């Protein structure tokens, strides 16, 4: 006899609302959250992901900007395919800053949005530097005219009570510009203080990472489609791996429609969203033989920096526990041998895990990640899996993420450049005054010359320094 159970519609509605409530209360809510639409007068601008940006010319947004000689530029023929935050820009002709007060020390997500729309492509040569507190983010940056907006993605440790973003036109340039800024307090589990340092003949723990500055260079959804900010709790974009996959013989993409099982102490939704962990690229054995090949990804990078390589794993392909064993290689060095996800995830399939490795990129200009079978791999099973890759640049010894230069030296460099311009000006003024006084001496006699002295250069330097202070504090 078949027994049918009817579900009360009211009960179903209550359950749905309860599950929605749980999702809301357990989702990440940043303590500090600043979204600025630069060059805009609008109190609120909705981007394509329904986030609310505040115009830096609005009553609220103007409190963050400290700039003299800056202008607001708008695009008349806006590209409707792009977010409204790319329809305006703030252009600086002198060093200028945005200041954001923060409620607690810790890591902060910082995103800088650049898009040189048609109105920004007039005669000026935009080349500039960007620094945040003691870190250089961009040096001699041009934000070249591209068909799409550019988003620079950083995470920086802040312990000074405020985030100070400084835009400085380069010596051979007249302007700097920015379209939008995001400053968001990061989840405490987003970056660990320890990683595994992997180099030739070395595989050892590396501590003290958390207080560095980081720039995410690549964020890749392995085996899956593009993940947009709307589907990521930290509003990140994950790109498909096809561009970086160099060796894929014997591998395939897989998709998991079940629930990703996040565990305390493991990867959270802020570390990686469901849409990253429910897709993967795998190696599987066939014909009772284990394939002798690796999946390989290659990423071009800038030399002279250490890089944090974060690999995301979630066994969504095995049909039973204890069947998946594989090796992980970074830059050709064995980083993880006989990786057994079952043990790491407490005997649970579909539970995410990530591993951080640090490498020192000195001169090759590229980083490689490989995943393949180990000597413990089994026939007729999955022999390798990877769900996501993040390549993250770390600051150098000067606190810089772009060039061998410090934030202090950029400020001093700009001051020296102004003095170089100022001294010839003062000299020219002195010559004019001397010529004028010579004429006057001939007219009124030699006695007037005794009371005259040339204008001292030091007095003009004092005025210059004062002018700089006014530039940095005037709205």
Image: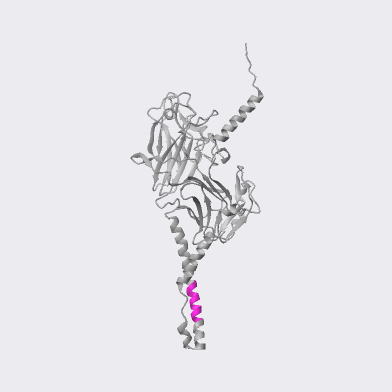
Query: Residue at (46%, 74%) from the top-left corner?
Result: 456
Residue situated furthest top in the rendering = 1
Between 309 and 270, the residue placed more toward the observer is: 270
Quadrant position of the N terminus in the picture: top right
Task: Give the image location of residue 116, x and y in percent.
Answer: 58, 53
Is residue 220 shown to the viewer in this render? yes
Query: Residue at (47%, 76%) from the top-left corner?
Result: 455
Task: Give the image location of residue 19, x and y in percent.
Answer: 59, 30
Q: Main secondary structure of the magenta part?
A: helix
Is 338 positioned to the left or the right of 281 in the image? left
Between 44 and 242, the residue placed more toward the observer is: 44
Tell me how many marks there are: 0
Query: Residue at (61%, 56%) from the top-left corner?
Result: 73
Quadrant position of the C terminus in the picture: bottom right
Magenta residues, start to end: 425-435
Q: Is residue 377 found inside the magenta-colored segment of the image?
A: no
- Give the quadrant of residue 50: top right
User: Does residue 81 lie above or below 450 as drawn?
Assistant: above
Residue situated furthest left in the rendering = 201
Between 293 and 414, the residue placed more toward the observer is: 414
Is 198 positioned to the left or the right of 44 in the image? left
- Give the quadrant of residue 75: bottom right
Is residue 293 shown to the viewer in this render? no
Task: Give the image location of residue 82, x and y in percent.
Answer: 61, 47
Task: Give the image location of residue 95, x and y in percent.
Answer: 52, 59
Q: Which color scheme is applied? A: one colour
């Amino acid at each position: 006899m078949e027994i049918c159970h009817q579900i009360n519609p009211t009960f179903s509605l209550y359950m749905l609302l309860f599950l929605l409530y749980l999702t809301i209360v357990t989702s990440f809510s940043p303590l500090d959250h600043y979204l600025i639409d630069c060059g805009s007068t609008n109190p609120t601008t909705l981007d394509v992901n329904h986030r609310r940006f505040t115009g830096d010319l609005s009553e609220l947004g103007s409190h963050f900007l400290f700039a003299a000689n800056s202008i607001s530029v708008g695009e008349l023929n806006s590209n409707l395919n792009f977010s409204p935050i790319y329809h305006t820009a703030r252009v600086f002709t002198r060093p200028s800053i945005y200041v954001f007060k923060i409620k607690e020390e810790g890591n902060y997500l910082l995103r800088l949005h650049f898009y040189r729309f048609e109105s920004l492509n007039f005669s000026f040569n935009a080349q500039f530097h960007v620094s945040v507190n003691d870190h250089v983010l961009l040096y001699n940056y041009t934000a070249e005219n591209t068909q799409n907006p550019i988003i620079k993605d950083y995470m920086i440790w802040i312990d000074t009570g405020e985030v100070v973003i400084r835009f400085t036109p380069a010596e051979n340039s007249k302007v700097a510009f920015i379209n939008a800024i995001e400053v968001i307090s990061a989840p405490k589990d987003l970056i660990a203080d320890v990683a595994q340092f992997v180099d030739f003949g070395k595989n050892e723990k590396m501590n003290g990472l958390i207080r560095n500055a980081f720039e995410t260079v690549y964020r890749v959804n392995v085996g899956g489609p593009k993940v947009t900010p709307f589907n990521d709790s930290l509003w990140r974009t994950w790109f498909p791996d096809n561009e970086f996959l160099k060796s894929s013989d014997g591998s395939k993409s897989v998709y998991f429609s079940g629930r990703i099982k996040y565990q305390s102490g493991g990867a959270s939704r802020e570390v990686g969203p469901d849409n990253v962990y429910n897709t993967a690229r795998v190696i599987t054995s066939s014909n009772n033989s284990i394939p002798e090949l690796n999946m390989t990804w290659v990423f071009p990078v800038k030399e002279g920096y250490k890089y944090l390589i974060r690999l995301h794993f979630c066994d969504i392909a095995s049909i039973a526990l204890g069947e998946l064993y594989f090796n992980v290689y970074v830059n050709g060095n064995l980083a993880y041998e006989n990786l057994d996800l079952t043990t790491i995830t407490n005997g649970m399939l579909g539970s995410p895990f990530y591993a951080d490795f640090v490498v020192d990129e000195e001169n090759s200009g590229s980083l490689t990640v490989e995943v393949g079978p180990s000597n413990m791999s089994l026939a007729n099973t999955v022999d390798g899996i990877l769900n996501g890759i993040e390549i993250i640049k770390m600051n150098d010894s000067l606190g810089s993420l772009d060039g061998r230069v410090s934030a202090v030296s950029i400020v001093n460099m700009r001051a020296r450049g102004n003095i170089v311009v100022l001294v010839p000006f003062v000299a020219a003024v002195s010559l004019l005054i001397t010529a004028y006084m010579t004429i006057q001496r001939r007219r009124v006699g030699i006695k007037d010359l005794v009371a005259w002295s040339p204008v001292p250069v030091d007095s003009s330097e004092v005025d210059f320094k004062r002018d700089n202070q006014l530039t940095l504090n005037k709205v």
